[in-house]
């Protein structure tokens, strides 16, 4: 089977000034994931590598470049899922870890749990020696400016959807040469969200889902809308119906 990785850098209108950086960023992330697969890595390794590349790139709303909440703080959400076993790991409301997708993977592989939030996620990160960064390091000058302009969440969401400086959640899906699938999603969430708000991204079946029997999905968009329909799992249910493997 040919191994493939597909990445997305987030929906919403990407302004001209960010268009090149976004296109270059998704290409670089796809190359990163692809080189993992070519080197014999698993689908899980590939999606983690691709999402890490976007978390490290301030053109995207994940890791470096994340949106700010109502208090002007970064709160990051990530998930990763292994289609072989349906194992998943996620973190939510994390403030000072640059590559939360790797922390999500550690939750999946090293704990008995699926989701860790806030302080618990940080304590776990510390216990496995994962480096923290000063939270301000994850925020771009442009995000400070936009956050300062848009103090109203609802108006901000409307504006973001319709054209301004918005860039949403990133993600990747992959299939490896053994036919195993995986997905990963990572985000700073929506600008001016309430403190402690968790969107779709770290929620299994909403922000992402992977199952070797049907495929892999990573979502981007308005979290509260995605959560209502558990979008990632819904998409795979439709795939299963089309393929007749319900
Ligand atoms: N889809 C990202 C969020 O709503 O937080």
Image (spheres, rainbow, N blue to C red):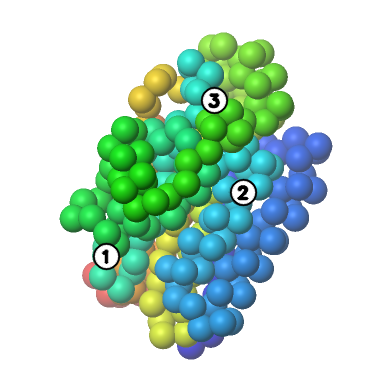
Gap between marks 1 and 3, in whole Å?
32 Å
Q: Is residue 48 left or right of residue 25?
A: left
Seen in the picture, residue 121 relative to 25 is either above or below; the reply is: above
* Labels 1 & 3 near each other (Cβ < 8 A): no
In the foreground, 61 or 117? 117
In the foreground, 64 or 243? 64
In the foreground, 9 or 68? 68
Q: Looking at the rendering, which quadrant does residue 183 occupy?
A: bottom left
Q: Secondary structure at mark 3?
A: loop
Q: Residue at (58%, 82%) from the top-left corner?
A: 38
Pointer 1 or 2: first along the chain: 2
Position in image of residue 78 (x %, y %)? 42, 46
Q: Is residue 102 visible?
A: yes
The residue beneath circle 1 is: 86
Q: Looking at the rendering, which quadrant does residue 195 occupy?
A: top left
Q: Which mark is residue 68?
A: 3
Position in image of residue 59 (x %, y %)? 68, 42
Gap between marks 1 and 2, in whole Å?
27 Å
Q: Secondary structure at mark 1?
A: loop
Residue at the bottom extreme, as displayed: 1
Q: Is residue 239 visible?
A: no
User: Callout 1: few (<14), some (14-19), or many (20+) C-alpha neighbours within 10 Å?
Assistant: few
Q: Which mark is residue 64?
A: none
Q: Residue at (41%, 36%) from the top-left corner?
A: 94
The residue beneath circle 2 is: 56
User: Callout 3: few (<14), some (14-19), or many (20+) C-alpha neighbours within 10 Å?
Assistant: many
Pointer 1 or 3: first along the chain: 3
């Amino acid at each position: 089977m040919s191994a493939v990785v597909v990445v997305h850098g987030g929906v919403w209108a990407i302004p001209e000034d960010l268009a090149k950086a976004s296109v270059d960023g998704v290409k670089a992330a796809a190359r990163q994931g692809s080189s993992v697969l070519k080197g014999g890595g698993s689908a899980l390794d590939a999606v983690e590598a691709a999402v890490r590349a976007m978390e490290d790139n301030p053109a995207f709303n994940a890791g470096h470049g994340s949106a700010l909440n109502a208090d002007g703080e970064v709160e990051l959400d990530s998930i990763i899922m292994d289609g072989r076993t349906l194992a998943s790991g996620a973190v939510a409301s994390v403030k000072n870890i640059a590559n939360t997708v790797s922390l999500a993977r550690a939750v999946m592989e090293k704990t008995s749990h699926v989701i860790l939030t806030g302080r618990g996620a940080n304590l776990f990160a510390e216990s496995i020696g994962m480096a923290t960064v000063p939270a301000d390091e994850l925020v771009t000058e442009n995000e400070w400016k936009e956050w300062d302009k848009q103090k109203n969440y609802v108006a901000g969401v409307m504006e973001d959807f319709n054209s301004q400086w918005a860039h949403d959640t990133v993600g990747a899906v992959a299939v490896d040469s053994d036919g195993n699938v995986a997905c990963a999603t990572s985000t700073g969430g929506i600008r001016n969200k309430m403190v402690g708000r968790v969107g779709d991204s770290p929620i299994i079946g909403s922000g992402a889902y992977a199952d070797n029997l049907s495929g892999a999905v990573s979502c981007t968009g308005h979290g509260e809308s995605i959560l209502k329909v558990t979008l990632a799992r819904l998409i795979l249910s439709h795939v299963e119906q089309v393929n007749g493997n319900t």
